[in-house]
C-alpha cells in the first residue's frame, strides 16, 4: 500500500477526534512511513497540547504529506503553530467534528484570504485606471 501511495502522490494527514480519524482511515488514508510514524493522530480529552503540537510539527516537516486535516476545535489549541505555518504545502484545512460545528470566523485560511482580498481591494482604490 505504501508503494502504491508513493507512486500515486502525496498523503493526507489527520489530527482529530476518534470519529474523524476513523472515518478518514475507513476511507483509505492510513499510511505508516519508513520510520513507522502514522499519518494520523487521535485526540481525546487526555491528549496534551504539547503532544498535538509535536505531531503537527512532525506532519509539516514530512515530505510525503501535502494536506493536513485538523478538527477546528483542536486547531484552536495550537492556533499559534498553525498561524506560524506560512508555506502553502502542506495545506492546513480545518474541519468540523461531530461535537463542534465549523466556525468560518476561526478558520486561518479564510482569515488570510480576507486579508488578501482587503489588500487587493484597497490597493485598487488608490490605483489610477483609465
Image (cartoon, grey):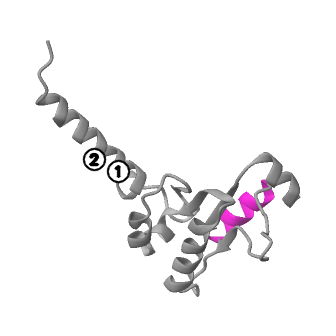
Disc 1 residue crowd, few under 14, some 14–19, many 20+, Cα 10 Å: few
Which residue is the site of mark 2? 115
Q: Is residue 39 left or right of residue 87?
A: right
- Choose between 101 and 90: the one closer to the eye: 90
Q: Residue at x 73, y 59 (%)?
A: 23
Residue 129 found in image quarter: top left
Q: Residue at x 80, y 58 (%)?
A: 26
Residue 80 locus on image (x, y percent): 38, 72
- Choose between 112 and 66: the one closer to the eye: 66
Residue 58 locus on image (x, y percent): 60, 74
Numbered marks: total? 2
Relative to 72, say whether 114 is above or below.
above
- Choose between 80 and 44: the one closer to the eye: 80
Which residue is the site of mark 1? 112
- Is label 1 in a helix, a strand or a loop? helix
Instruction: Identify the magenta region.
Output: 16-27
Which quadrant is the C terminus positioned in?
Answer: top left
Which quadrant is the N terminus positioned in?
Answer: bottom right
Disc 2 residue crowd, few under 14, some 14–19, many 20+, Cα 10 Å: few
Q: Are marks 2 and 1 in contact (CB under 8 Å)?
A: yes
Residue 107 appears in the picture as rendered: no
Q: Residue at x 87, y 57 (%)?
A: 3
Q: CA distance from mark 2 to mark 1?
A: 5 Å
**Residue farthest to the top, as pictured:** 130
Relative to 69, say whether 18 is above or below.
below
Residue 62 locus on image (x, y percent): 64, 66
Residue 61 found in image quarter: bottom right
Relative to 86, say whether 76 is above or below.
below
Amino acid at each position: 500500500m505504501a508503494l502504491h501511495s508513493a507512486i500515486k502522490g502525496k498523503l493526507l494527514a489527520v489530527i482529530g477526534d476518534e470519529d474523524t480519524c476513523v472515518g478518514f482511515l475507513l476511507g483509505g488514508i492510513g499510511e505508516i512511513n519508513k520510520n513507522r510514524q502514522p499519518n494520523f493522530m487521535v485526540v481525546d480529552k487526555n491528549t496534551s497540547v504539547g503532544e498535538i503540537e509535536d505531531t503537527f510539527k512532525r506532519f509539516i516537516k514530512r515530505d510525503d504529506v501535502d494536506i493536513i486535516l485538523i478538527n477546528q476545535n483542536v486547531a484552536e489549541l495550537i492556533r499559534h503553530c498553525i498561524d506560524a505555518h506560512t508555506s502553502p504545502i502542506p495545506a492546513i484545512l480545518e474541519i468540523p467534528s461531530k461535537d463542534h460545528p465549523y466556525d468560518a470566523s476561526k478558520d486561518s485560511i479564510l482569515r488570510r484570504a480576507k486579508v488578501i482580498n482587503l489588500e487587493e481591494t484597497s490597493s485598487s482604490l488608490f490605483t489610477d485606471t483609465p
